[in-house]
Amino acid sequence: MSELLIAGGRVVDPARGVDGRLDVLVREGEVVAVAPDLARGGSYERVLDASGLVVLPGLIDMNVQLREPGRSADETIASGAAAAVRGGFTAVAVMPNTEPAVDDEAGAEFQVLQGKRAGKAWIYPIGAVSRGLEGKALAELAGLKRGGAVAFSDGDRPLRSAEMLRCALLYAKMLDRVVVQHPEDYDLAKQGVMHSGRVSTILGLAGKSAASEQVMVSRDLTLAELTGAHLHLGRISTAGSLELIRVAKHKGVRVTCDVTPHHLSLTDEAVESFNPCYKVDPPLRTQRDVEALIEGVLDGTVDAIASDHAPHSPEKKDVEFQFAPSGVIGLETTLGVVIEHLVHGRGMPLTRLAELLSAGPARILGLPGGSLAPGAPGNVTVVDVDGAWTVGPEFVSRSQNSPFVGWTLRGQARYTVVDGQIAYAAEPAPAG
Ligand code: DOR
């Protein structure tokens, strides 16, 4: 029998309204009890001392690229799953922009199987909306669901056809799945390599305007309202997009959204260094946008924070800015950046942290977990909220394209428990 008692920590579980010093008992991979002083008088197969630490429902990253199949030099499911647990994540949802794209049942099944073989963070495929991510014909959505897909998306390629998105939303609604759209009007944005504004003008680089995101957000919200389906807008980066979403939510549109840690902590001024590690899609925006995103995170308009982990090997990424691929890794830094900037920096309560990185993603994708209710998966993240650490230059990820290398952050996973087993320990695992 596998049994683990996580003792003496501050359990923060907003889905159950729990915030206090409690013990968590996990048996055969399931939460069986969350109560005070379970450690007193009982004997357990393994005891993890969580005193002075925060115990959260296992964190879930709902927007990750792991590059398998097809680009294993950048990342594999095994290396990405190991990076995830080091970053405190017990489960990740994997985007279909692989080579070939994950657009059928077999592709989804393959990713699930690779995740089981890796034995680290749980892997949930997000299946392609369109065949081959070409935006022309719908993929086999029912087959993708059978294969384990928890959502449908064309990854970083926004669905340009409104009719294609309308049909996808209707099918997804029938299949009880969410459509994840990365909103960007391709024609407005296609030449841009950074945010279009003062900095791009000074640098002489072609820009992507805030409007190129907001135009698509507005169109997609109209389709969500028309179909009554659940639309999730990923990687929201502008103040204007967030205001459109806020109004839509108020009208009762079934829309959720996420933002990334880099859009909460960096602006387009970072591009003045021409370091390709600051080239991302959507691009880093202005301080006004950063402040608006933080406001949305604090006031509940934003439903989740997701890393948009986008590994690129050094050979590909370390080239002239305008020729570099977009994207940064984030599995190992998201928790630290969010705790440093929002918990310590803006006083965000830990209950909100748990909502954004666990309960929210679970609710949006309809996943088990997001809470430590008895019967929930034995996925638990034990966090040292005040421990300072320095990012990089080494990572568990196969790639190192992080914009946070050298940053000192307070907040990191001390233990990541998956299926009742300690999948990552920042210190030697406890004896016994
Ligand atoms: O900058 C990005 N690169 N953003 C995305 O959403 C996709 C990612 C990638 O796959 O490289």
Image: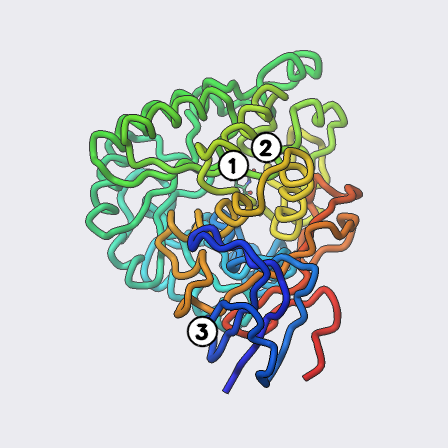
The residue at which mark 3 appears reads as: 32
Secondary structure under badge 1? strand
Closer to us: 319 or 165: 165
Q: Residue at x 51, y 24 (%)?
A: 238
Secondary structure under badge 3? strand
Picture quadrant of residue 129: top left
Secondary structure under badge 2? helix
Q: Position of residue 183 (x, y in %)?
A: 42, 31
Kind of residue at disc 3: Val
Asked if 302 appears above or below 393 in the picture, the reply is: above
Q: Residues within 10 Å of mark 2 (few under 14, many from 20)?
A: many
Q: Are marks 1 and 3 in contact (CB under 8 Å)?
A: no
The residue at which mark 1 appears reads as: 259
Relative horizontal placement of residue 28, taking residue 348 as reference (left or right) = left
Instruction: Nearest to the eye among marks 3 and 2: give it.
Output: 3
- Of label 1 and label 3, which has the lower sequence position? 3
Q: Quadrant of ligand 1?
A: top right
Determine if residue 357 is in view: yes
Instruction: Nearest to the eye among marks 1 and 3: give it.
Output: 3
Picture quadrant of residue 121: bottom right
Asked if 49 appears above or below 222 in the picture, the reply is: below
Kind of residue at disc 2: His
The residue at which mark 2 appears reads as: 263
Q: Residue at x 66, y 66 (%)?
A: 50
Q: Residues within 10 Å of mark 3 (few under 14, many from 20)?
A: some
Q: Position of residue 176 (x, y in %)?
A: 25, 51
Q: How many marks?
A: 3
